[in-house]
Amino acid sequence: MLALAAAGTFAIGAAAASALAVPATRAAKQQVTPRAATPIKHVVVIFQENVSFDHYFGTYPNAANTDGQPFHAKPGTPAVNGLSGALLTHNPNEDNPRRLSPSQALTCDQDHAYTAEQKAFDDGRMDKFVQFTGNSSCTAPAAHPAGLVMDYFDGNSVTGLWNYAQRFSLTDDSFDAQFGPSTPGALNLVSGQTHGAVGLNAAGHVVPDPGVIGTPDASGVGTLYNDQDPYFDDCSNHTGVPTTGPMIKMTGQNIGDLLNAKRITWGWFEGGFAPTGTTASGTAVCGATHTNIGGAAVADYIPHHEPFEYYASTANPHHVAPKNVAEVGHNGPANHQYDLSWFGKALDSGNLPTVSFLKAPAYQDGHAGYSDPIDEQHFLVATINSIERSAYWHNSAIVINYDDSDGWYDHVMPPIINPSADPATDALNGPGVCANGARLGGYQDRCGHGQRLPMLVISPYAKVNYVDSTRTDQTSIIGFIEDNWLGGRRIGGGSYDALAGSLNGMLSFRHPDFRPLILNPETGEPGT
């Protein structure tokens, strides 16, 4: 494992990382805000990558304090449903969970495919992670003979996140909406739906691929359960078909469509979205890179992490920039899809959209294999500091959530609220079976919930030092948006938002605490 190196650069602009001046405050007051059902007028969703709950919070609030930043829980800090007792010393898996130190922050990617995760759950026994989601090709320390898939970090590595949990709200009962990798998680965040997928080649011809789209119908429409690039994106792999499978067009609607219908400002902001050039044919090139703590150059933009690019209605295929900051959040050539730098500009100028989705450049998104908790902390803290110092802090909620678990061990068997029975893909309860019962929309290949994931709410209206145990998933976020600004309207068509638990258990509207918690991006500890 590689040791810690110097911190990477922050993904947002320097201006956004500093406190807003008085002119920005005046601009914020002048901005017309739609009527909200709660005191929360702005939501910022920070959507990170590939972490199970136990991988980051399994021993919360108790850290080893043998290395890294020391962490000492406040008196009265509630415990979580985490790793303790026999789960640490006599785990039913082939290996016990072991703590990873800050010097082991760079790890390899685990197997987090739709079927592999179901097999690891082994009919609810949660005892076959080593066999089915562990990466056997990964070089692990001598003390970890079965690999890393069982292992976890604590507050000496994910210090910032543990400090946010101390001051705001954490849930230990939030799940991936369904089993599988990044793309299904991202699509569920914005639509609650992975059915309606159509595989297309570079010429736009339908390519039904049962290895990517489960049980496509005669027109090629099926359910996406794999990682495939969006068709409406110049930076997708347009030359890899069919060797890497088809690109995907999603039918149906997403939360952006619902917000547009009500003229509510919103945007998706992603690191590396701004083109670094164009090809001879005029298509955008996404060539921006950053170096992670291990010294590896990592491409900032990953197309299959951008869910709105799968939908013709919300895509910005050529990565066109808005003409100015006043356009951010509104209809225009960028179609609500922006480079991450525009979030900082909008925040500084008093033009923050009502709903913002943030995606870090890849080296800071937390995904094992190319990112890590240390680089991730730099992004999270710098971004959250900028919001807390802004004129918007008093009426905002920041939600930190993840797209999938990466296959990392978590000991909690999720409730299966949406079964599936595809002989080619499902395996939770035996070959071809992932629970029984009625399916949302009647669609296969969306079995879930999947693994437990971290979720935190950071807001003056978040309960303080609180652990919530209300069942939620990624679509609980769009459920809050729908309830707060859309009169409770749901996307429909079998969207998971119809079953999503509420975020309100993490909130307290009667007793807000407007004090910000400013952390040091390097240490994750309070102080600049």
Image (cartoon, rainbow, N blue to C red):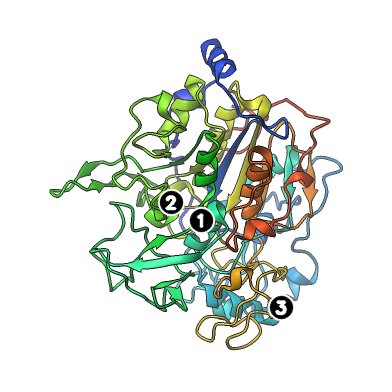
Q: What amino acid type is highlighted by mark number 2?
A: Glu
Look at the numbered discs 3 and 1 and tell me whether their residues touch, using CB distance below 8 Å: no
> Where residue 21 appears, x then y in whole percent?
53, 13
Q: Quadrant of residue 316?
A: top left
| Residue at x-position 69% and y-position 71% | 416
Look at the numbered discs 2 and 1 and tell me whether their residues touch, using CB distance below 8 Å: yes
- Please name which of the two marks, 3 or 1, marks the residue nearer to the observer: 1
Label 3 crowd (10 A; few <14 / some 14-19 / many >=20): some
Secondary structure type for disc 3? helix
Q: What amino acid type is highlighted by mark number 3?
A: Gly
The residue to which callout 3 is attached is 124
The residue to which callout 1 is attached is 186
Is the residue 103 above or below the residue 219 in the image? above
Q: Is residue 121 left or right of residue 258?
A: right
Disc marking residue 345: none
Q: Is residue 277 left or right of residue 209?
A: left
Outermost residue, left side = 280
| Residue at x-position 67% and y-position 61% | 54
The residue to which callout 2 is attached is 306
Secondary structure type for disc 1? helix
> Where residue 72 appears, x then y in whole percent?
75, 43
Label 2 crowd (10 A; few <14 / some 14-19 / many >=20): many
In front here: 210 or 65?
210
Q: What amino acid type is highlighted by mark number 1?
A: Ala
Q: Of marks 2 and 1, which one's residue comes earlier in the chain?
A: 1
In front here: 494 or 465?
494
